[in-house]
Image (tube, rainbow, N blue to C red):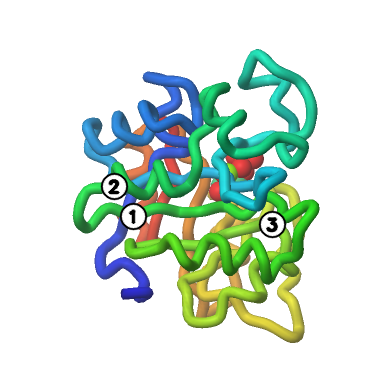
Amino acid sequence: MYTWPQKPFILAHRGARSQAPENTLAAFRKAFELGADGFECDVFLSRDGIPVIIHDQTLDRTTSQKGFVWDYDAKDLQALGVPTLQEALEIIPSGGIINIELKGCKPFSPEYLGKQIKKLLNHYVIISSFDTELLKVWHGYPTGLLFEADQPIELPKDWRPDALNIDFSCLHIIPAGYKTILWTAKDFKTAGDWLALGVNGVIAEC
Ligand code: G3P
Ligand code: MG
């Protein structure tokens, strides 16, 4: 099950966030309706150790409350419109892809974050992160190490991701032997143009 998707793919960045609030079930459903192969989402742990989907480490920007995600239990976050990862997994149609970006594990460990997510998975999944420590516990799963647009591509010495998730501007400097996911295309048309260059996947706004 945990093989790399067979065909090139387009993933909606935080769901179809031009159509619904980012990282919500509505945005994820809309992504499939618009023709995406799947969606990218951002995961933290709640105070009670449940994987929840939100981009920022605080609630301030996207909910009516303030404070750190890890100071709230999952049920309270759900009441604020922050879905659990389990809820998001349940709406994925057969063959759909989810890219889970690991944002943080506080106040738990990378191993605990990994364990809490792995027990939910039954999908085509790509696990990505800017944080090598969070990714290293994902042996046997498709992994992508994220790089910012202006970040030098320096690879860890003690561990190897399957893919490098990079900005389009870095495409010409990617080392040989890695799968490639480009982020973030401004729309599906651009994503299609980028896929035609031979990369494995594109994360796009939609
Ligand atoms: O995975 C690509 C992209 O989502 C990484 O940056 O800040 O949008 O989570 P960010
Ligand atoms: Mg992300």
Residue 164 versus residue 156 in the image, above or below: above
Asked if disc 1 and disc 3 are in contact, CB closer than 8 Å, the reply is no
Asked if disc 1 and disc 2 are in contact, CB closer than 8 Å, the reply is yes
Where is residue 119? Give x, y as percent: 47, 66
Determine if residue 193 is in view.
no
Residue 158 versus residue 199 in the image, above or below: below
- Of the two numbered discs 1 and 3 on the same chain, state the one appearing first in sequence: 1
Where is residue 17? Give x, y as percent: 44, 26
Q: Quadrant of residue 64?
A: top right
Q: Quadrant of the C terminus?
A: top left
Reading the image, the residue beneath label 3 is: 130
Q: Residue at x 49, y 35 (%)?
A: 83
Where is residue 101? Give x, y as percent: 57, 52
Reading the image, the residue beneath label 2 is: 92
* Residues at marks 2 and 3, CA–CA distance in whole angstroms: 25 Å
Q: Amino acid at mark 3?
A: Phe
Where is residue 171? Give x, y as percent: 55, 59
Q: Amino acid at mark 2?
A: Ile
Q: Nearer the viewer, mark 1 or mark 2?
A: 2
Reading the image, the residue beneath label 1 is: 97
Residue 109 versus residue 84 in the image, above or below: below
Q: Nearer the viewer, residue 113 or 168?
A: 113
Quarter of the picture for ligand 1?
Answer: top right
For this view, does 114 lie left or right of residue 202? Answer: right
Question: Few, some or many C-alpha atoms within 10 Å of disc 2 (few <14, some 14-19, many ≥20)?
Answer: many
Residue 194 versus residue 145 in the image, above or below: above
